[in-house]
Amino acid sequence: MLVSVIIVNYNTFEITCNCIESVIRFTKGVDYEIVLVDNASTKDNPDDFLGRFPGIKLVKSPVNGGFAKGNNLGIEHASGDIILLLNSDTWLTEDSISIAAKYTASHNEIGPLTVRLVYPDGRLQHYVRAFRSVGNELLDLVRPLLYLLPYKVRARKMLNQYFNSDFDTECDWVSGAFMMFRRSLLDELPEKKLDERFFMYGEDQLWCYQFKQAGYKSFFLAATTVVHIASASTSADKRLQLHKTLIQHELEIMKYRKGNSLYYSAFRSLFLLKQNTAYFIRTLLNKADIKA
């Protein structure tokens, strides 16, 4: 069993080096290769990675085609029968790759797999998700009532912020920051590769839906933890812009799932009402921070 660790870099040389160093330091229980895709970085020379890590495969893209395209390019140059998409802003603190790979290899019924993700300060990231639905959006509006349910019932139904990532579970979609799957599953996707319609953000949900359509559920493995910087270091303005992009992609994914139907229209109205309210509140808080 060979695991191909695909890392996409764009102008984050030192952060990406930290990621690679952690993979080399902690991955002991499985054979692996690191395929680093540089997405036409403008600040650093990608050949410098080879100076630090001569054993990696370096793929230099002539253009920045985004996260999905970069990962597909890496997969084209990968030799492993198990693929791990690993964000450049993650780092390992234990042999997470071996733990995840052994589980993936022994469970042919599962599709994409992720592990527990935390911020550098240890706070949990809620990247174990259920697909959005009208029902769950309405339930989220009466959040206090959900907490009257037993924890595992509430957690399995809603996932996301209702789930503490403290037990293994099937789910609808998992984060692309650490997403592992058997390479053979790509042949069952619509284009036999990861869908590239989104430049960045939301693509992991789309991929998991397509894997599910092919008969493979996403899975969360609680046995190991990976650190993920994520948006913790992103400015408030950029987080607000990201919020807009995510809203747009959520609606596109729902239309992809349900078509231009009455269900989609109902979901769109409810979802936009909730998200625009949240966006308005975040904008006010952002302005307050600037004044302070």
Image: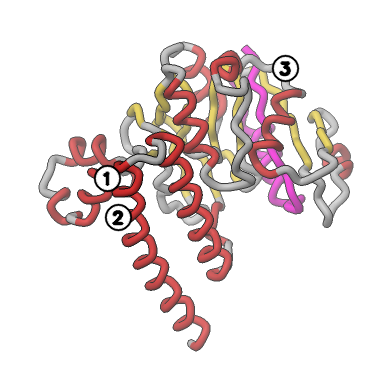
Q: Nearer the viewer, residue 129 or 91?
A: 129
Task: Determine the image quadrant of residue 59.
Answer: top right
Q: Nearer the viewer, mark 2 or mark 3?
A: 2
Q: Nearer the viewer, residue 255 or 275?
A: 255
Measured Cα–Cα span from mark 3 to mark 1? 42 Å
- Horizontal side, residue 110 vs residue 169: left or right: right
**Residue at image mark 3:** 79
Q: Give the percent coordinates (x, y) of residue 105.
A: 51, 13
**Residue at image mark 2:** 270
Looking at the rendering, the stretch of residues picked out in magenta corresponds to 1-29
**Sequence-first tag of 2 and 1:** 1
Task: Determine the image quadrant of residue 264.
Answer: top left
Tell me: residue 136, above or below residue 101.
below
The answer to whether the residues at label 2 and label 3 have Cβ atoms under 8 Å apart is: no
Numbered circles on residues, count: 3
The three-letter amino acid code for the residue at tag 2 is Leu
Residue name at image x 61 percent, y 47 percent? 200
- In the drawing, what numbered circle is on residue 134? 1
Q: Is residue 82 magenta?
A: no
* Residue 28 visible at all: no
Q: Give the percent coordinates (x, y) of residue 210.
A: 48, 27
Tell me: residue 101, above or below residue 148.
above
Q: Nearer the viewer, residue 165 or 277?
A: 277
* Residue 192 visible at all: yes
The answer to whether the residues at label 2 and label 1 have Cβ atoms under 8 Å apart is: yes
The three-letter amino acid code for the residue at tag 3 is Ser
Residue name at image x 22 percent, y 56 percent? 141
Secondary structure at numbered mark 2: helix
Measured Cα–Cα span from mark 2 to mark 3? 45 Å
**Sequence-first tag of 2 and 3:** 3
Measured Cα–Cα span from mark 2 to mark 1? 8 Å
Outermost residue, bottom side:
291
